[in-house]
Image (cartoon, coloured by chain):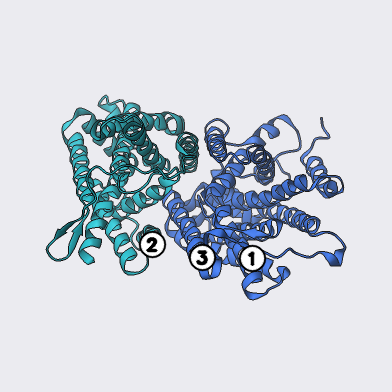
Chain colours: A blue, B cyan
Amino acid sequence: MAWLTRRNVLLAGLGLMAVLPGFANPYALFVANLLLIYVILAIGLNLLVGYAGQLAFANAAMFGIGAYTTGLLQVNLGFGYWQALPCGALLAMLIGSAMAYPALRLSGLYLALATLAFAQFTQWVFLNWETVTYGAGGFKVPEVSFAWLGVPSHIGIYYLTLVHAAALFLIAWGIVRSPIGRAFVAIRDGEVAAESLGIDLLRYKALAFAMSGFYAGAAGGLYCAALNFVAPEGYDLFQMVLHKAMVVVGGLGSVVGSVLGATLLVLLLELLRGFKSSQEIVYGALLLAFVIFLPEGVISLVKRRLAGWEEPMRRHAASAEPPPSAAAEATEETGRP
Amino acid sequence: MLGYLLFSGVTTGALYALVALGLVVVFKATTVVNFAHGDLFMIGGFLAYTLHVMLQVPYVPALALAVVLAFGVGMLTDRIAFRPLMKSNMVALVLATVGFSFMLKGIGRAIWGGRGDYLPFPPLVGFDPIMLPGDIVIIPQQLVVLAGALAVMLAFAAFFRLTRAGKMMQATADNAKAATLVGIRTERVYMLTFGVGAAVAAAAAALMAPLTLLYPDIGFALFIKGFAAAVLGGLTSLPGAVVGGVLVGVIESLAAGYIDSSFLDVSAFVVIMAVLVVKPTGLMGGRQLRRV
């Protein structure tokens, strides 16, 4: 099965997604749209947790900030969707990078709890700042018009999401292979060692938080247009566990793994739709089981069985050209087995 | 007004202190924050509800039985979410307890949800408020809760000081390697620790249930409040957890009374952020060491 390389599989997936509106019914198209949104979310979270090793729990909050900003700018201030969407992503990015400051002082558990508390705070704002956010009931967002392209709104949004997902995947792919990605991994594997090699902790942590915030914010803006509705419960703790489970099931520290994890779990979520308690049990159990039995995620199985799926972060020892920076060497020295 | 707010703050604060005690006792022994602690609280509360309301067991035996059952669920937490990962890193441990907490929440919702979701728990004593001089109004239920919380705290302290198991737990928390060397089976102690933490949480839940309502999502709210209390007290100090709990209760009550009732839910967050940013070691915590 030599043809089942990563590039072929990803291109086939992209091709399938691109022709899907031609034959899928609206429900299947909505699920596919959701899948792409979760791919963006999972990749963004993986950059922060899997690569930079920052145990943050605010991803669902960033998703919510993106969605609320995009929606509220349209409803309250009369922005168009095309202005509101980048604003949502940028605001999530700004708030994300502001979180790097506490993250400098806090690590591990303390960071996890501080970000969890922050996530709870954003929920509280969504619920209680009623004059602006419309409280617990949420609000409707006008449909985005794609008349200038001659396609109906839901197909236009689908393609917009597909383009975003593909572009953000490629950006993440590029970043984890660059010195920035190596600096992230060096920080994950040992902050003191990374700092002693000249990696500016604040700068790279802020970058990791900002990128992850941007991904979640963009996903939020796209989600708001896909649903035409924004309400607090879409961005709650369950979402947080969902994102975490996608990253863990796919594989921490693997961009392609996040795509796999998001795909598997969105399909599972659709099977369990309407059964809140079984969703919680299944996702909790999946998270637990993968952490215990398969901590490297589904991607590690794929890598073992098929050729052509190696991750760039782990290939430097074998590659012909020497690693370009000290950070890369640090990665190898302190790299995990 | 002030007297009433202070008193009700101290009452709920005492319950937060119990939740915090469970978190701190597990953290001291294992250096893990049990993210499933709030859901152990929830399960404990529903167990007490099942026994007392559905099966008509009198309150005190129902509370005791719920505590015993929760002790078992706590030990199960250790076996499922902690022991297989003892040698893993922090990320794995946190994610495992988060996963377990959602499993518990889903189980709680499957068993006890869908009954209007907010289950009332009958009060133990009448609702006629007692008027004290100086315009202080006290609801008798609060006195019962406060007394119960104090009794649990005293029992907890006695367990640590006086029993063999308590001393083993202290030794393990102090230095796990040395404890192993003198023949303490630390794995059993960890299991016991998780059990004790869950038992205290269940006692808090059974005491709190008559004051509030029970619902499957109550766990996380209590986890955040208990954690705010624990972190205010320093995360490694048992007396600190009690002081922190009472302080969080009072802050919350004053914020709700003088600013706006919606601030009840957010003050724990403000406390956590303020403590973590200003003084991460809390009021009574030891100096934090950074492992390299």
Viewer-nearest residue: A285 or B28: A285
* Residue for point 40% across, 58% down: B265
Q: Amino acid at mark 2?
A: Val
| Subunit that carries the residue with mark 2 | B
The answer to whether residue A174 is visible is: yes
* Residue for point 27% across, 34% down: B63
Q: Determine the CA span between mark 2 and mark 3.
A: 16 Å
Label 2 with label 3: CB-CB less than 8 Å? no
For disc 2, the marked residue is B270
User: Do callouts 1 and 2 point to residues on the same chain?
Assistant: no
Q: Determine the CA span between mark 1 and mark 2.
A: 27 Å
Label 1 with label 2: CB-CB less than 8 Å? no
User: Do callouts 3 and 1 point to residues on the same chain?
Assistant: yes
Does B26 sit left or right of A271 as displayed? Answer: left
* Residue for point 42% across, 28% down: B79
Q: Which mark is residue A71?
A: 1
Does A156 sit left or right of A336 as displayed? Answer: right
The answer to whether residue B286 is visible is: no
For disc 3, the marked residue is A98
